[in-house]
Image (tube, grey):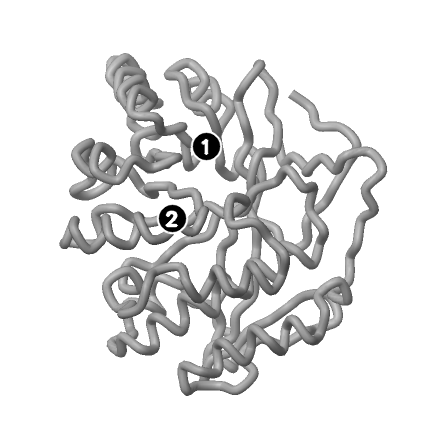
Amino acid sequence: MDHVLTRPTGDTEVSDASVIDAAKLEYINRLLARHGFESAPLIQHPSRIGARHEDWRFRSVFQPIFSLQDGRLTPYALEALARVADRSGSQFPPTLMFAAETSPKRTVFLDRLLRSLHLLNFLRQQPPTGLSLFLNVNAQHLVNVNETHGSYFADVLTELGVPAGRICLEVVEDAVSDPARLLEAIKSYRQLGFRIALDDFGQGASNLERVWLLEPDYVKLDKRLMRLALMRPDLRDTLAQLVDILHLHGARVISEGIESGRQLDIAREVGCDYAQGYHLAMPIETLQYSATLGN
């Protein structure tokens, strides 16, 4: 059921990297070079923007998030995901790369590098103006940043002419042990205009107290909840009640890990606003557009 994205009538599809002005790329590289690593970690290739750091090589892929309103599947946003390889081409999960890093300076740099990379690859393809971009914020970044959270990325958005409201920053709320530090970061991001999503809700120590404290715009239900709801029909009423509580606190709910048509039906039945998963669309490097989108 791999859907493609809808481009509004009259828009022109652009498939090469030339839409990213070289001067803007150079400006962002200068910002990143202040961290004291590579002088030009972002690299313009013929069909994409790439990134590098020491032995690591990075590229972007995007997975759509679909609205479930009105019984249709409508592209609402894209979540950017990193693909990481070493010099030999061997692939590594980004979480493994960050887990191996012990330097606070390096984790801040890598987090900013990846978000810049994803934003550039998103803009390169001239997506529909109504399409938002969801970007992950590494938990160690929240802990290790000394200056105001979001100031670097706000500079990048200003240079590229992108409103902060088009960007949603995803944080894993139970990955930071200090709620006060997490709240401070969220407040800074929100003051700059970013939207906020709590990721992997229902995993680990995540709880409603953090939702009340942080007041996120979105809560992304961990895929394990949908798997449990599929195996245990008696839990679906409980899941629907959880979605209702999240709605009462002003959050829109995204069901992650939709891997079958039945899971999609359950997401609708329990009241989720949006859905994301391999059943709907696989992560892809180059966005594909069509004039229509099926049910």
Report the amino acid beneath label 1: Ile
Whether residue 231 is visible here, answered yes or no, is: no
- Tell me if residue 129 can be seen: yes
Picture disc at residue 191: 2
Q: Looking at the image, is 232 positioned above or below residue 207?
A: above
**Circles 2 and 1: CB distance less than 8 Å?**
no
Of residues 276 and 77, the one nearer the viewer is 77
Q: Secondary structure at mark 1?
A: loop
Q: Nearer the viewer, residue 95 or 178?
A: 178
Q: Is residue 77 above or below residue 86?
A: above
Examine the image and state in which quarter residue 289 appears.
top right
Which of pointers 2 and 1 indicates the residue nearer the eye?
2
Q: In the drawing, does residue 291 fall left or right of residue 97?
A: right
Q: Quadrant of residue 257?
A: top left
- Within 10 Å of disc 2 (Cα), the crowding (few <14, some 14-19, many 20+) is few
Mark 2–mark 1 Cα distance, whole angstroms, equals 33 Å
Lateral position of residue 153 relative to residue 160, left or right: left
First in sequence, mark 2 or 1: give its number: 2
Whether residue 191 is situated above or below residue 219 in the rendered picture: below
Residue under the point 44% across and 47% down = 194
Q: Residue at x 68, y 66 (%)?
A: 48
Q: Residues within 10 Å of mark 1 (few under 14, many from 20)?
A: many
From the image, which quarter does the C terminus lie in? Answer: top right
What residue appears at the point 49 percent right and 72 percent down from the top-left corner? 85
**Residue 65, how many percent across, how many down?**
53, 36
User: Looking at the picture, does residue 150 appear above or below residue 212?
Assistant: below
Which amino acid, mark 2?
Answer: Gln
Task: Report helix, strand or loop for mark 2.
Answer: helix
Location of mark 1 (residue): 258
Where in the figure is residue 229, as x and y percent of width and height?
31, 22
